[in-house]
Amino acid sequence: MNYSYPLNPDWTKDEIVTVVKYFEMIERAYEKGVGAEALKDSYRAFKNIVPSIGEEKQLGREFEAASGYSPYQVMKLVKHATTSTIKMQP
């Protein structure tokens, strides 16, 4: 990984850890696969910190620009998932 996560300097250390864990789950969905429920839990924790849809979209765009991984596409797949594991296709 040669990129940094989009973070808000106003967040507490715990909030930063929660947001980073969410982005790590997105990475894992592309690289290895991740449990759907674990990803949903991580997203709910992320939304407690970033309740604004606009800020969520902005952070998602920044993360995708840096990593090539789309949080939007992962969460779209989770929403319609019929399996317990989420693995994005290349």
Image (tube, helix red, strand yellow):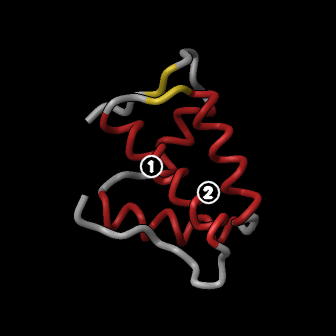
Q: Position of residue 15 (x, y in %)?
A: 66, 66
Give how far apart the Cα atoms at labels 2 and 1 are.
10 Å
What SS does tag 2 mark?
A: helix
Tags 2 and 1 in contact by the CB under 8 Å rule? no
Residue 40 lies, in percent from the top left, at 65, 37
Q: Between residues 70 and 22, which one lies in front from this camera angle?
A: 22
Q: Residues within 10 Å of mark 2 (few under 14, many from 20)?
A: some
Which secondary structure, mark 1? Answer: helix
- Foreground pick, 69 / 42: 42
Asked if 13 appears above or below 46 in the picture, the reply is below
Q: Is residue 55 left or right of residue 77?
A: right
**Which residue is labeled 2 in the image?**
18
Query: Percent from the top left, x then y, of residue 10?
Result: 65, 84
- Residue found 57% across the figure and 23% down from its top: 81
Task: Give the residue number, with chain letter if any, for mark 1.
Answer: 24
Whether 49 is drawn above or below 45: the answer is: below
| Quadrant (top left, top right, bottom left, bottom right) of the N terminus | bottom left
Quarter location, residue 2: bottom left
Crowding at dot 1, Cα within 10 Å, few <14 / some 14-19 / many 20+, comes out as: some
- Of the numbered discs 2 and 1, the one sitting upstream in the chain is 2
Residue extending farthest to the front is: 13
The residue that appears at 61% across and 65% down in the rendered structure is 56
